[in-house]
Amino acid sequence: MDIPSLAGVLQAALSPNPDERKDAEQRLDQFQYTPQHLVRLLQIIVDNNCNMAVRQVASIHFKNFIAKNWAPHEPGELPKISASDKALVRDHILVFLVRVPPLLRLQLGECLKTMIHADYPEQWPHLLDWIKLNLQDQQVYGALFVLRILSRKYEFKSDEERTPVYRIVEETFSHLLNLFNKLVQIPNPSLEVADLIKLICKIFWSSIYLEIPKQLLDPNVFNAWMVLFLNVLERPVPVEGQPVDPELRKSWGWWKVKKWTVHILNRLYTRFGDLKLQNPDNKAFAQMFQNNFAAKILECHLNLLNVIRAGGYLPDRVINLILQYLSNSISKNSMYNLLQPRLDILLFEIVFPLMCFNDNDQKLWDEDPHEYVRKGYDIIEDLYSPRTASMDFVSELVRKRGKENLQKFILFIVEIFKRYDEAPVEYKPYRQKDGALLAIGALCDKLKQTDPYKSELERMLVQHVFPEFSSPVGHLRAKAAWVAGQYAHINFSDQNNFRKSLHSVVSGLRDPELPVRVDSVFALRCFVEACKDLNEIRPILPQLLDEFFKLMNEVENEDLVFTLETIVDKFGEEMAPYALGLCQNLAAAFWRCMNTAEADDEADDPGALAAVGCLRAISTILESVSRLPDLFVQVEPTLLPIMRRMLTTDGQEVFEEVLEIVSYMTFFSPIISTEMWSLWPLMIEALAEWAIDFFPNILVPLDNYISRGTAHFLACREPDYQQSLWNMISSIMADGNLEDSDIEPAPKLIEVVFQNCKGQVDQWVEPYMRITVQRLRRTDKLYLKCLLMQVVADALYYNAALTLSILHRLGVATEIFTLWFQMLEQVKKSGVRANFKREHDKKVCCLGLTSLLALPVDQLPGDALGRVFRATLDLLVQYKDQLAEAAKEEEAEDLDDMDGFQTDDEDDDADESDKEMGVDAEDGDEAESIKLQKLAAQAKSFRPHDDDDDDSDDDYSDDEELQSPIDEVDPFIFFVDTIKAMQASDPLRFQNLTQTLDFHFQALANGVAEHAEQRRVVIEKEKLEKASTAGAS
């Protein structure tokens, strides 16, 4: 297609007629891979005689095509763009970059970024020469623009990946320095000069972000740069030309230059100028920076802040960065000494006013309360907020220099409280009171542990916070709720004060002002966590939940959902009457959040975060009512549409959370419904197409389907779940591109089938054995080898005669058993066993090996019998020792808990891993209950750490085990009963076996037999106790 024809098609793509548009887009797609197409698009983009709208469409099409096709995405994929076309585009894009309008330059910049990331330096070795040449002539802006993109490629690279930076700095920084020097000396510089300086700053920033290149460590070179940065820092920003609009003003070129300069100086100071943080190689640089520049920068920063004290303007981001620099200076004696003479003015006349409610806050509160709420709870906003930086400065000051400053600052706050109390209503300093309350809340941790303040906190709340719950000013009501929440955990001498604070916060949920309602919800979470007597909240629970959902209909906020989760967590099964309503409301809120997120298309959109929170809250509710199966039947119709939609590519952002809900629904429902079974194909399809990273999470519901819906799994032919499972597992196990760690859930699923479908899947034993052996031969990782060998053990336990005959038929029996015995005997340097480390692994191997012992002599000859017998004995003893050690650890932890050393729940789950393994009846009901409740959460720990260290114990923790039929099988009793059966059916064989045992193995055999009888007694006793308990209830 020639250029005029292509321009015509692009023009048609702008047509108001949808059919014409569609036809044009199809033609563009049809011709996109033809030779020279990309070059022609570029020619249209740079043609000044062409219609601007057409050029813009061409630039977007050009950018999208390059992003998708410039570099192959998959190994072995054929290139979509010819080498000659690429060379033409590379040569021409650099020339025309500066000639196109800014709107088009933005699109070409994105293209350049893709091209540089793919091609430099290998396919584009002359790029740096072009930059260097053009830095010295008329194409300066273009050279800087390209150099910025190039330097940014290496901004976050470290070690050898960073090597190209050194050449970039070597070739260009002397030219940059000369250019910077000339620009700084221009009298009355234009906005174009600001753009050039800004680009130089950004290039410098990217080049020093992780490490200072060695060329800059030369004191003369570094000093030359610092002179220029300090010049820019000190120089007032031109007054003329500054926009009036605040949004445009902060983005104005000269303020951007100021921001990037402060940014760079902060980075140099915090990362490279701190003697305590530096490695020995950089100590000299840190010392030089402290001696020559740190104090000068501090002085410039203080002078800049004086501008706002005098009522002048500084952008929020600049104030924030300067305060970060000052906060970092507090702990350094030399810097703090320089700060001290000006500290009172800084603290009381600059920092504190920044903490107070201001005109902009009031404007946003009145005009857009939803945006006010969003900004208040947005972590990203905190990066730019002078208020957050001011709070951090005060916190750091009282933490590091509390002796000199805490009392002084508190007296200042008390004086504000006093002036506020004494002033008549119309003259009360409401905004200063707001700042004072913010300060008190920010210093909560310090005040709670410092005399004499900690004993006065309750009185302070009653006198200065409680009255503001009924303030005529909305922002003070909100701040009162927030401060009350910060102090909810203190020990109240009068419980009525806790009660009053709680009820005031609850009343705030019905406040007419949205920000007050949201801050009240946030505070409520603290009260729920701190509440020692739930009767304080229990009577108002229905009204609380009602207010919650009214608020969730109004605003999408993660913290709302966090508070709801906390309530559900605290009240547990008491939430049962509300569970259905909660799930329905959360589901409705979820759909609203998803619609908002899709409309905004922002990765960090609060709607998307709140959507995740809604699903997490639903999981928390399902966990809290896990012992009430009928409730799961009631909530299923509400949750099914979410699960159906979000198990497709639409749900990639929430896939983990949805799988957790599916896990609960398939485990705790009385039966797995036909509708729930309809989710199986969706998970299998996702796994095949894009969700391999979620395989450990998908394993959990698939296990539930097979273990709890065994009859349906076996009987159903449309769809055929057995075939579907085989297709998925065989495809994953045979995939040579997948790492060993990616496929670990596959052998676990084969185990689920063999253990749950005993005697019913004979036709699958051979296929599963074949792929297991094939993968075993090319597996490097020990943990996966153990899992694959356990598949063999499971198959033997399923049907030893069948499995052994299959192994012989495949010609691998000797190979497999030789490897298995080697793995059982392998020890690490420390002397501990290298393989089958978990209790579960040992148990599976014991059951598989013991099953072999039951085979007749023609299938298991005498030599083999003896070897299997000895290996099983060894393994049973190891298993017994591991159980005893786990029991001892559990007992010690119980004692610790009784002494008040309760550890974090999650740590308990990891450390008490053995407790959640199938240790038969020894586990007790409590362990079983914990296991049920943590079922879906365990999926998160299913994937061992991505760690190539085969000896890592992280791979072998027992906390990942789900329930299985072998939990009810005691391997000691199983072994002894098998041997007794052999003794009864073939006494001569038994006699030959025992006579070949040396003293050591005879002793082991006697010990195992004795232990088995003890276990029999214990299990029988527990059965009787369970039966009597069940009868009594």
Image (cartoon, helix red, strand yellow):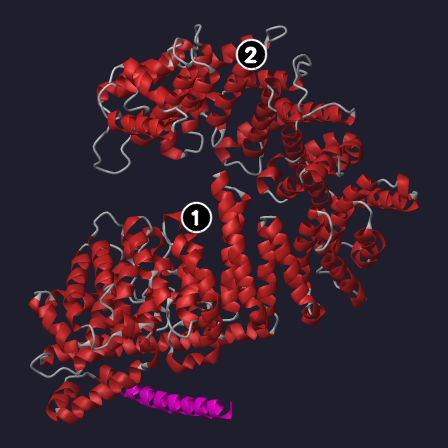
Q: Using the image as rendered, state which of residue 86 and residue 416 is in the foreground.
A: 86
Determine which residue is flagged by label 2: 193
Amino acid identity at mark 2? Val
Please, is residue 445 above or below residue 493 in the view?
above
Residue range (magenta): 1005-1033
Residue at 72% x, 27% y is: 305
Q: Quadrant of residue 963?
A: bottom left
Q: Using the image as rendered, state which of residue 534 and residue 994 is in the foreground.
A: 534
Secondary structure predominantly adopted by residues drawn in magenta: helix
Residue at 50% x, 13% y is: 177
Q: Which mark is residue 653?
A: 1
Q: Secondary structure at mark 1?
A: helix
Amino acid identity at mark 1? Glu
Dot 1: few (<14), some (14–19), or many (≥20) neighbours within 10 Å?
A: some
Q: Using the image as rendered, state which of residue 291 and residue 791 is in the foreground.
A: 791
For marks 1 and 2, the one nearer the N-term is: 2
How many numbered badges does the structure rendering display?
2
Q: Position of residue 800 (x, y in %)?
A: 17, 77
